[in-house]
Image: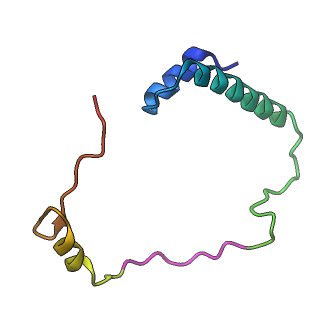
């Protein structure tokens, strides 16, 4: 069972502000999910091949190659704040 204290800790680490009702609801939902996983762990999966897709499609992999887009200078020109060839932004981390 996932306790309310565990949900509060998860919410804190995720920077979420949850009401008491949301904490209770998440505790119950996460407990049901964990229970379902425990049921799945009991299944005999010997000889069962992993299923990658239910539609029968294959994942086509290609080499990941970088190539210049040619718009870097235009982006820097329209940015509200920039320095040399870089766009300056506000900090998006919320560290304590």
Q: Horizontal placement of 44 versus 27: left or right?
A: right
Answer whether residue 67 is magenta in the image.
no
Q: Which residue is drawn at 46% across and 27% down?
A: 17
Write the start and end of the magenta stretch as one range. Answer: 58-66
Q: Residue at x 86, y 45 (%)?
A: 45
Give coordinates of residue 75: x percent, y percent: 24, 74
Query: Which residue occupies the extreme left position in the image?
Result: 84
Q: Which residue is drawn at 32% across and 82% down?
A: 69
Q: Horizontal placement of 84 versus 23: left or right?
A: left
Answer whether residue 61 is magenta in the image.
yes
Magenta region, main secondary structure: loop
Decide which of 76, 61 is in the foreground and name it: 76
Give the quarter of the image for residue 35: top right
Q: Is residue 59 above or below residue 44?
A: below
Give the quarter of the image for residue 28: top right
Decide which of 1, 48 is in the foreground and name it: 1
């Amino acid at each position: 069972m996932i306790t309310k204290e565990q949900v509060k800790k998860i919410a804190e680490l995720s920077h979420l502000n949850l009401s008491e009702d949301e904490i209770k609801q998440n505790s119950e939902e996460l407990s049901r999910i964990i229970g379902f996983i425990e049921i799945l762990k009991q299944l005999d999966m010997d000889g069962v091949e992993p299923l990658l897709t239910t539609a029968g499609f294959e994942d086509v992999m290609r080499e990941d190659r970088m190539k210049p887009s040619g718009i870097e200078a235009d982006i820097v020109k329209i940015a509200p704040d920039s320095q040399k060839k870089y766009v300056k932004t506000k900090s998006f981390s919320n560290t304590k």
